[in-house]
Image (cartoon, helix red, strand yellow):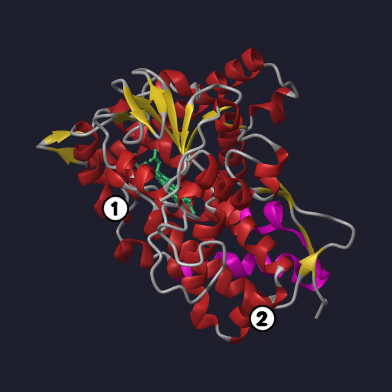
Amino acid sequence: MRAPNPDPETRKVNLFDPEVARCPQAVYTRMHTQCPVARASLTNSPVMSRYEDVIQALRNPALFSSEMELQMALGTERPMIPQQLDPPLQTRYRKLLDPHFSRRKMAALEPDMRRYANELIDRFVENGACDFDPDFAIPLPCTVFLRLAGLPLEDLDLFLELKNGIIRPHLKTKSIDLEVNKNARVESGRQIYAYFERVVEDRTLQPRDDLMTQLVHAEIDGEKLSRNDILDICFLLLLAGLDTITATLGCNIAYLAANPQQRRRLVAKPELIPNAVEELLRWETPVTGVPRLAREDFSIGGIDVKAGELVTLLLGAADVDADEFDEATRVDFERARNRHLAFGGGPHRCLGSHLARMELRVAMEEWHKRIPEYAVAPGRQPRYSPGIREVLELPLVWPAP
Ligand code: HEM
């Protein structure tokens, strides 16, 4: 049993420190021994790092609420469904949505997914070099999502622009001013609502065999979803389903570029890829943490949490907790028991996990079939972002065929 450190100063953690971006696992492991519950140095809000604490909190929405759309300021006009709702309302929407994202339904997308991956690789394989995100990891999940939703593939660039307007408004505003970027998010939010409103209109008049039509006709307890319900679901799918895959693919390929022995094992034994996908999700945990709103006062690990405080559940730290994982800091593609929290847990566990797993597996299989040997371009170092863990630039090179 590890005793928490009583010194308030060492109970602070700066999640935006460049060291966290460079080597989060070392910071997380230090937290486990020194301050399993800390306070964020920038916001002073509580941060939980132990697997057991994090999973208990994820499973207890009555105390750790997700109803905090105002605090998140993501350009929305209403809560995103189902992520910013608590049970029992959230459960009603999940019952409706889960069947549309089942393993079986997602498996049906696999042949198209393989084709898209290969079409992208065709464009650069003979160059012996690519810029991994713009050339592969960004367009791939977006194309799959458009195909799933039944939206025109020509909307790819527009979709990326809308999503970036919320996630990276500074790229458009060229400003770091919080107010400027908040306003830009609101404007992008309006465009996202307007885009999906047009699609809903179209599918109401001309039903098709796609997810958007299914949402238009979906019912909860005999009642159709309202137009706003559909828009609030689509807004979330756009934010949750694209960058997460891009970030995970980037982390995986950067890890394998830096660890050629592990990469060669995967190339020699592609049957290890599904397990490697899980292990890299655990090790990298790209959604490093999720926020929750404390509903009551309580104490945990020597920290007093007040009702109304935002609490960060540090999924990435939970995923390297030695109390849960054998040899937690070793990346083992044959790990037998791996209950990682990269997709969260409890009622909000990722709706798109079957889709994500299929996309990651297929992308890793097709990439390594065609480009088994690769490295980061000479003189370049991958730089990681804090928050969502992603590689900011990943220029790759390989022997051209
Ligand atoms: C590797 C890729 C992905 C990762 C690491 C990931 C991670 C997560 C995590 C950690 C949560 C929990 C959030 C919370 O507890 O507040 C979540 C929720 C969610 N994810 Fe994913 N996700 C991925 C891909 C996707 C995809 C492809 C989609 C959809 C197309 C998706 C849709 C959602 C939705 C709708 C929720 C909210 C579920 C709810 O609140 O009931 N995700 N995801």
- The structure residue drawn at horizontal position 26% and vertical position 31%, both measured from the top left corner, is 86
Residue 123: in magenta span: yes
**Ligand 1 closer than 8 Å to the CB at disc 2?**
no
Q: Position of residue 136 (x, y in %)?
A: 65, 58
Q: Quadrant of the C terminus?
A: bottom right
Secondary structure of the residue carrying numbered label 2: helix
Q: Earlier in the sequence, mark 1 or mark 2?
A: 1
Give the image quarter of residue 185.
Answer: top right
Give the image quarter of residue 137.
Answer: bottom right
360 and 71: which one is in front?
A: 71
Q: Position of residue 204 (x, y in %)?
A: 29, 37
| Left or right of 302 in this view: 167 | right
Q: Position of residue 359 (x, y in %)?
A: 49, 62
Give the image quarter of residue 48.
Answer: top left
- The structure residue drawn at horizontal position 34% and vertical position 51%, both measured from the top left corner, is 210
The residue labelled by disc 1 is 100
> Can residue 207 be seen by looking at this rendering?
no
> Can residue 98 be seen by looking at this rendering?
yes
Give the residues drawn in magenta, as a range. 111-138
The residue labelled by disc 2 is 264
Using the image, tell me which numbered label, if any, was put on residue 239. Answer: none
| Left or right of 350 in this view: 10 | right
For the residue carrying disc 1, how many other residues have a C-alpha within 10 Å: few (<14), some (14-19), or many (20+)? some
Q: Main secondary structure of the magenta part?
A: helix
Question: What is the three-letter code of the residue carrying label 1?
Answer: His
In this picture, is 165 found above or below 247? Answer: above
366 and 50: which one is in front?
A: 50
Residue 113: in magenta span: yes
For the residue carrying disc 2, how many other residues have a C-alpha within 10 Å: few (<14), some (14-19), or many (20+)? some
Question: What is the three-letter code of the residue carrying label 2?
Answer: Arg
